[in-house]
Image (cartoon, coloured by chain):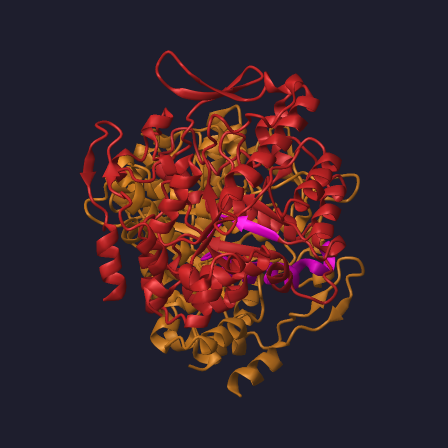
Chain colours: A red, B orange
C-alpha cells in the first residue's frame, strides 16, 4: 500500500483546553467558580480552581519544537502551537500529519480528572465535570464530528455519579471514558473491590470503553530521586503493564464479561512476553491461587478485553500475531514529545514494509480496529477517498509545519515539509 | 541436538542455609551471637539473629511438591526436600534434572544480604557476612567445585567493606557478588551517586560480576493491598526492568566501562521492546537530557554490560538475535515455584526446536555464556562427556524425584520419572 492511500485514526492525543471552554456551560451559581486561566506576574498562563494552581499549561505541548527544547514546556498560549488548543488549527495539523481522526485526553484536569477528586464542594465538581464533558463532546469534537472520537472524564469520587455521567454522555454519542489505571494509588478502593460496580454496569450497558492512560494514577515508575529523566521516560509503559495485570486477575472481567479496556500509550512490544508470563503464572500457580477463567487462559482473556496501541513499536509489529492484530491500534500522541507528527505515516509505513505487514493488517491497525472498538464511523460523514493521507495533506497544502524555537520564536529548521512528504509518498 | 547431549549451567538457583553453617567459622566473641536456627513451639524452624526472627525458612522451597501446595511454605527442615539445604543431595537433584552446575542465591539473609544492613553491631555483621561467604565458597560450593559458581554477599552498609570483601573472596576464586537491584529503595544512596565507587572499582579490578536478583530491593511491584497474589507473580520481572533502566542511564557504565551486571530471574522476552524503548528515548530526548554514550546507542550499552537469563521464555528465544545470543543464560530457579525441575531440559529443548535455535546458539545459552561471563570452567575438573544431561542422569539413576505432599508427606503423583526422561531423551 502507498502511504498516501493509508487512513490513520489515532486513539491517543491530547487537547490543551482553551480558556473560554466553560463560557455559557455553567449556571450562575457555579460560573464564577469555574476553572480559569490567569496570567502570572512572570507571564505564565495557569489554570486556577478552588485555590489550586495547575502550572505548565502546555503539559509537554512541544509539537513543532526542536528536540533540543523538549524539556521546556510552553508557559503561555502564545508559545504554543495553536493546534494544541484551537480545534480548527488542530484539524489542519491532523491533516498535515495525514491523520483522519483522533481521540483526545484532557490536560489540566489530569488524564483521569483527578483534579476534581480534590474539590471539596462536590456539587461544584459535578457541575464542572459535566461542563467539561459538554464542551469536549459538543465544542471540541462536535466542530468536526468525523475527525474526533469523543471521550468523557469521570467523577472519580463517586461511582454512582460516574455511572450516571457515562449514561448521560452516551446519549450524546460519547462511548469512551478516561479513567485511572489504578484507583488504589489515588487512595480509592482498588479494582478488586466491588466499589466500582455501578461504573462497570454503566460501561457495559452503553458499550463504553474504559481508557487507562499511562501516568493516569499519578504515579510513574521512578527508581530514585536523583535518577535522570531518561529512566522515567524509558519506564513509562510499565505502569500500563501493572494496570493490565491488575485488571486481568481481578474480579472485573469475570463479573462483567463485556467490559473493554484500552491501554492508552501503553505500547505493544512488551505484550507477547506479558501474555507468556500470564499463562505461565496461571499454569504454575492457579491450583493454589484459585484463579479460574472458565477454562480460558489469561492470554485469551487479555485479547477479549484489552485494546492496545503504539506510537512506533517495531517489536510489537513484528509479533503482531502473538498480540492479536485485532487488538492493536495506532496513536499519534500529538502534541507530546513522543509524537512523530507530522511524519508519523512515513514512520509506520516504513515499519510495516520492514515486517511484511499485509495491507489488510495495516488497515486494521491504522484505523479499522479503532472504528470497530469505539464504534466510530467517519466514512458516514466524509467519503473514504477524502480520508486518506494523500487527500488530507492535499487539502492543507499551504499549512505551516515548520519547527520553531521557544527561545527565539524563529523558524529553526525544517522537518520534511508537506511538499516533500507528498513527493516521497508518491515516489 | 539430542536432549541427552546438552549441557546445562543455571545462573540462578537458591540455597536454603543449613543450621550448622556457621560452626567453626566465627571467633568466640561472635560465635554465640551468630544467626541460629530455633524450633518454635508450633514446630517451625526459624532463623534468629540479634532479636530478629526470619520465618518461612523454606522461602518458597517447594521443589518436588504438588502445584496445589505451592502457596504453602515448608516450615521445618524435615518438610523440605533435602536438596534445598544438603549439598550432596542438591548435587543429586541437579544431576537428576540434567544440570551440571549452578549459582546459588542466599535465603535467610535475603538476596542481597539485607538482613545485615539492619544489624546494629557492625563488627558482628562484618564477621557474620565473612563467615557466610566462607561457608558458601568453601563449605557449599567447595564440596563440588565443578558443580557450583560461587557467589558472595555484600556488606551493604559500607561500600569500602564491600570492596574489601570482593577482593578477599576473589582470592578464594569467587568472582560473583549478589547485590540489590536498587539501593535507593533500601534507604541507601542510589546508583546515580558516587557512594558505590569503591565497590565498582573492586568489581572491575577483580573481574567480578554484580548480580541483581528480582525482589532484591525488597520491593516487588504491587498494585493494591487486596490484589490477588497472581498480580504480583506476573509482575515480578518488572523490578528488573526498572533496575536495568536505572543502571543503564546512570553514571556507572560511563565511568566504569568494564562493569558487568547479571539481571537474575529477570526473564528475556521483554528485552527487545526495552531496547527499542531505550533507543527511542535516546533519539527523542538526549538533546535536552544530555545523555551521551560516546556515539553508542543505549541498546549497544545494554549488550556490553548486561547478562540476562530465563527459566522458560518463548518470546526471548524467538527474538534471541535482537537481545544478543551472547547475552542470554538459562536458569533453573531450584527450589522455587517457578522452576521446571526436574524436566527443565525437556522444556528448553522443545522451545529450541520450535524456534529453530541452532546447536551453537543452544550451547551458548545453556552453558557457554555462563562459563565465559563468570569465568567458570567445570570441564577442567570433570570431562565434558560426563557433564551432559544423559551422563548426569545416568549417574543418579536410582534417585527419588517423586512429588510428595506437604500435608500427608505421601507420594502424590509422578512427574516424568528419570527412566521416562531418559527414554524420551533418546527417542
Residue found at the far bottom of this picture: B427
Q: Is residue A2 visible?
A: yes
Residues B380 and A119: in front is A119
Q: Is residue A24 left or right of residue A366?
A: right
Residue found at the far top of this picture: A41
Residue B337 is situated, as x and y percent measured from the top left of the image, at: 62, 57
Q: The N terminus of chain A appears in which quarter of the rendering? A: bottom left
Quadrant of the image occupied by residue B156: top left
Q: Which residue is at a point 41% across and 49% down the rendered structure image?
A: A332
Residues B201 and B387: in front is B201
Residue A212 is situated, as x and y percent measured from the top left of the image, at: 57, 44
Question: Is residue B317 found inside the magenta-colored segment of the image?
Answer: no
Up/down of A427 relative to A346, above or below? below
Residue A380 is situated, as x and y percent measured from the top left of the image, at: 54, 59
Quadrant of the image occupied by residue A167: top right
Q: Is residue A400 left or right of residue A335?
A: left
Magenta highlight range: A261-289
Residues B168 and A111: in front is A111
Up/down of A95 relative to B63, above or below? above
Q: Is residue A363 left or right of residue A136?
A: left
Residues A305 and B402: in front is A305
* Overall secondary structure of the magenta section: helix
Residue B139 is situated, as x and y percent measured from the top left of the image, at: 48, 51
Q: Which residue is at a point 23% across and 29% down the rendered structure image?
A: A409
Q: Which residue is at a point 70% across and 73% down the rendered structure image?
A: B414
Up/down of A92 relative to A305, above or below? above
Q: The C terminus of chain A appears in which quarter of the rendering? A: bottom left
How many badges with numbers are in the image? 0
Question: Is residue A287 found inside the magenta-colored segment of the image?
Answer: yes
Q: Which residue is at a point 77% across and 44% down the rendered structure image?
A: B43
Amino acid at each position: 500500500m502507498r502511504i498516501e492511500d493509508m487512513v490513520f485514526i489515532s486513539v491517543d492525543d491530547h487537547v490543551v483546553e482553551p480558556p473560554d471552554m466553560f463560557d455559557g456551560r455553567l449556571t450562575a451559581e457555579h460560573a464564577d467558580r469555574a476553572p480559569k486561566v490567569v496570567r502570572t506576574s512572570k507571564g505564565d498562563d495557569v489554570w486556577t480552581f478552588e485555590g489550586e494552581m495547575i502550572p505548565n499549561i502546555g503539559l509537554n505541548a512541544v509539537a513543532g519544537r526542536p528536540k533540543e527544547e523538549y524539556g521546556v514546556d510552553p508557559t503561555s498560549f502564545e508559545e504554543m502551537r495553536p493546534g494544541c488548543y484551537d480545534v480548527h488549527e488542530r484539524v489542519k495539523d491532523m491533516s498535515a500529519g495525514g491523520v483522519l481522526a483522533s481521540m483526545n485526553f484532557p490536560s489540566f484536569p489530569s488524564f483521569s480528572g483527578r483534579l476534581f477528586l480534590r474539590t471539596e464542594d462536590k456539587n461544584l465538581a459535578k457541575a464542572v465535570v459535566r461542563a467539561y464533558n459538554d464542551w469536549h463532546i459538543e465544542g471540541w469534537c462536535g466542530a468536526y464530528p468525523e475527525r474526533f472520537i469523543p471521550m468523557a472524564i469521570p467523577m472519580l469520587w463517586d461511582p454512582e455519579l460516574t455511572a450516571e455521567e457515562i449514561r448521560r454522555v452516551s446519549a450524546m454519542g460519547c462511548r469512551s471514558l478516561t479513567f485511572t489505571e489504578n484507583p488504589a494509588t489515588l487512595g480509592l478502593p482498588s479494582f478488586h473491590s466491588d466499589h466500582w460496580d455501578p461504573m462497570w454496569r454503566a460501561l457495559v450497558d452503553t458499550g463504553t470503553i474504559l481508557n487507562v492512560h499511562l501516568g493516569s494514577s499519578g504515579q510513574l515508575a521512578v527508581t530514585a530521586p536523583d535518577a535522570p529523566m531518561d529512566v522515567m521516560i524509558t519506564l513509562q509503559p510499565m505502569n500500563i503493564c501493572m494496570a493490565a495485570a491488575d485488571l486481568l486477575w481481578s474480579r472485573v472481567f469475570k463479573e462483567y464479561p463485556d467490559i473493554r479496556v484500552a491501554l492508552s500509550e501503553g505500547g505493544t512490544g512488551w505484550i507477547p512476553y506479558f501474555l507468556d508470563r500470564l499463562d505461565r503464572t496461571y499454569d504454575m500457580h492457579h491450583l493454589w491461587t484459585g484463579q479460574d477463567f472458565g477454562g480460558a487462559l489469561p492470554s485469551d482473556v487479555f485479547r477479549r478485553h484489552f485494546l492496545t496501541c503504539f506510537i512506533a513499536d517495531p517489536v510489537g509489529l513484528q509479533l503482531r500475531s502473538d498480540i492479536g492484530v485485532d487488538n492493536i491500534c495506532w496513536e499519534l500522541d500529538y502534541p507530546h514529545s513522543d509524537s512523530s507528527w507530522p511524519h508519523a505515516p512515513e514512520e509506520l509505513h516504513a515499519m510495516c514494509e520492514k515486517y511484511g505487514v499485509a495491507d489488510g493488517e495495516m488497515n486494521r491497525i491504522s484505523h479499522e480496529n479503532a472504528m470497530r472498538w469505539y464504534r466510530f464511523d467517519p466514512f458516514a460523514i466524509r467519503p473514504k477517498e477524502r480520508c486518506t493521507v494523500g487527500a488530507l495533506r492535499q487539502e492543507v497544502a499551504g499549512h505551516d509545519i515548520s519547527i520553531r524555537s521557544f527561545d527565539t520564536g524563529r523558524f529553526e529548521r525544517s522537518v520534511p515539509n508537506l511538499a516533500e512528504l507528498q513527493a516521497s509518498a508518491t515516489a
